[in-house]
Amino acid sequence: MTSLANILLAIIIVYLPYQLHFPIVFDVKGINFINLLFFFALLPVLMRKEKSQTLTPIKWNFFALFGLLVMAFLVAQARDGSRFADDLTILKTYIFYPLFYFLYFAAVRDVKTIRFLMLTMLFVTAVISLQTMRQGIDYGFGEYSHSKRAAGPFGKDFRGSNAAAAYFVIFVPLFVAAFLQYRLKLYERVIVAGAIFLGVFATFVTYSRQAYIILSAVFILHAMRRSIVIAILIVLFVSSYEVWAPATVITRIQMTEMTDESGEMVVDESTASRFLLWEGGTQMLGDHPLGVGLAHFPIEIGKYVPEYSNFDPHNGFVLITTEAGFLAVPVLLFFFGGLFSLGWRLSRFKKIEDARFLGGAYMVAVVGVIASNLFGSRLFNGEIMGNFWILSALVARYLMILKVKTPQIPIPASVAR
């Protein structure tokens, strides 16, 4: 039963980022395939006779976030109850995917399972990278075109490219952490290096300028944990991108700033629209300090920036703050502080290779999540964030394994000694 349960947990990791690519739809409204997978994975946990004696780390951080979302939902209904069913569906979706943190923390009890699920997560990231790279190669590198941005499994066309880029900046650096922190055999080092190449190339062909910056930054953060010399070499390599990057990538980067008819430097329309949306969001928050209500930013933004009516702010923190009000600020700080603390506490077990890798990799992954939400609203996107919540659970469980030696949890020999 345990093996079957672990296989199901691995299937969920593979399916989460492929939900849009392989949709399985049921006639019952509100029920989809990932809901059923969650339920079947939960059954062995509920049927388990022995209960874990360890408390779930940072559960109150998650509960605070859930409470914030519920409050924003209630504000939305108080202001306009005509969208009750739609708003309730969005609330359910927002809360559902973070619940994978609690599911996997409860389901996983030993280091062997953590390693198995981590390898599954790395494998699916490599597959997604390969798929996205192939898509980019098929599009070609002759001339940059907005419609030829690779999206991998995150969309049917270029409109999913930014989502793919957000996924890569969170998960591709895991390979960098493994390359720098593990004592790998030669063939293992070659495999990991190949996965890094696939991930970087895949990020290139999404043509997300923000992803280029974020991925470079997190690579440097990982390198600094190992050697300042390696970090400096990465800085020099990145800064010379015009020498080695594909021409289409260079063109895309240079599109950020252009010269107008008067000869002045201006940002491109995509970047400028974000600034207008954020400015409108600031005005919206000033008028509604308790928020405009969950999922109501697109409805309200037209009052402040008419040309961008029904637009997303392209910033997860602006979105949550405008919809949930000023209370969102301390809640988000509390929430992300809790996430970061998981990795920091685990990384303190420096003599244990797995802990050193997983703790450090996770801290940088949290940075990737924060950075990717500065230019997109990704925090509650299940295809991107589902596996991050699972990664958080694996970090939390491994931390508890090292801190609390209960009979139910096998302890690695290196720790037991």
Image: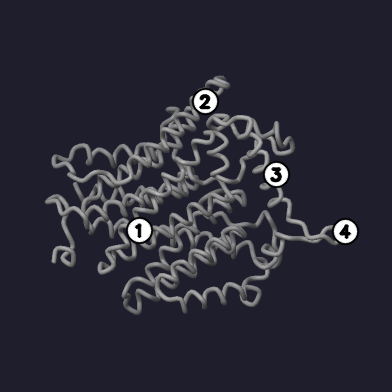
Q: CA distance from mark 4 to mark 1?
A: 51 Å
Q: Earlier in the sequence, mark 3 or mark 4?
A: 4
Residue 208 image position (x, y, % from top left): 60, 58
Q: Position of residue 92 (x, y in %)?
A: 43, 32
Q: Which residue is mark 4?
A: 262
Residue type at mark 3? Leu
Which residue is found at the position 53% from the left and 49% from the top? 373
Q: Are marks 1 and 3 in contact (CB under 8 Å)?
A: no
Q: Secondary structure at mark 3?
A: helix
Q: Which residue is mark 2?
A: 75
Percent coordinates x, y for residue 394 in the rendering = 31, 53
Q: Which residue is mark 3?
A: 276
Q: Secondary structure at mark 1?
A: helix
Amino acid under label 1?
A: Trp
For label 3, the crowd category at 10 Å Cα-Cα, with few meaning under 14, some 14 to 19 and many 20 or more, is: some
Which part of the image, by quadrant, shows the C terminus? Answer: bottom left
Q: Residue furthest right?
A: 262
Q: How many other residues sit within 10 Å of disc 4, few (<14), some (14-19) or many (≥20)?
A: few
Q: Are marks 1 and 2 in contact (CB under 8 Å)?
A: no
Pick whichever, 39 or 27, lies toward us: 39
